Structures are given as C-alpha cells and as structure tokens.
C-alpha cells in the first residue's frame, strides 16, 4: 500500500467499433507514464488484433495485452 497519491495515475481508452464502444482502464501502479503508454498502444493496436483474430475478442485482448507488456519490459 503506497497510500494516497497527489494525482491520478490511471489512464483510459475508448475505441469505437462497428459492434459498439470498447472502454479500457489501465492501472497506474507503474506510474502515469506506463498507464498512458498502455492506453495509447491499446487504442492503436486493438482494432488490428481484433481483425486478425477474426472477431475473437478474447484472443484479441490476449494478443494486444501481451504485445504492450513486451514493449514495457
């Protein structure tokens, strides 16, 4: 437990898809730079991963989160 923070370190992303709107929240436990980066990359990458997975949302999530994680580490 790090206690209260002076500012919000979480980030979010919204993606308009043909089937609806996808909203995602990224925890800022690694700092706002990490959550901002993850939100930006998620918004950029998710549509193409969804297309590549032929609409399989679960597979697209797995792939995009793995890709973002690999870039962070």
Image: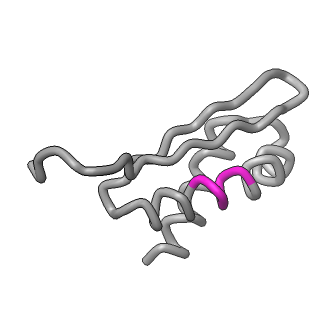
> x and y percent of residue 67 in the render?
59, 66
Q: Nearer the viewer, residue 36 or 19?
A: 36
Residue drawn 76% across and 38% down? 15
> x and y percent of residue 4 in the render?
17, 44
Residue 44 relative to residue 40: left or right = right
Residue drawn 42% across and 60% down? 32
Residue drawn 84% across and 22% down? 19
Residue 5 relative to residue 18: left or right = left
Which stretch appears magenta?
Answer: 39-43
Give the prevailing secondary structure in the magenta stretch: helix
Q: Nearer the viewer, residue 35 or 73?
A: 35
| Residue 12 occupies quadrant | top right
Q: Work out which residue is located at the far front of the displayed protein and give it.
A: 6
| Residue 15 on the magenta segment | no
Residue 8 relative to residue 16: left or right = left
Q: Nearer the viewer, residue 54 or 19?
A: 19
Q: Work out which residue is located at the far top of the displayed protein and give it.
A: 20
Whether residue 53 is situated above or below residue 56 in the rendered picture? below
Residue drawn 23% across and 49% down? 5
The quadrant the C terminus occupies is: bottom left
> x and y percent of residue 45 in the render?
74, 57
């Amino acid at each position: 437990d790090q206690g209260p923070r002076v500012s919000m370190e979480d980030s979010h992303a919204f993606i308009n898809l043909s089937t609806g709107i996808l909203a995602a929240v990224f925890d800022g436990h690694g700092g706002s730079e990490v959550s901002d980066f993850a939100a930006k990359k998620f918004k950029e990458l998710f549509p193409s991963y969804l297309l590549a997975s032929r609409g399989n949302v679960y597979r697209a999530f797995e792939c995009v989160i793995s890709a973002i994680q690999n870039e962070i580490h």
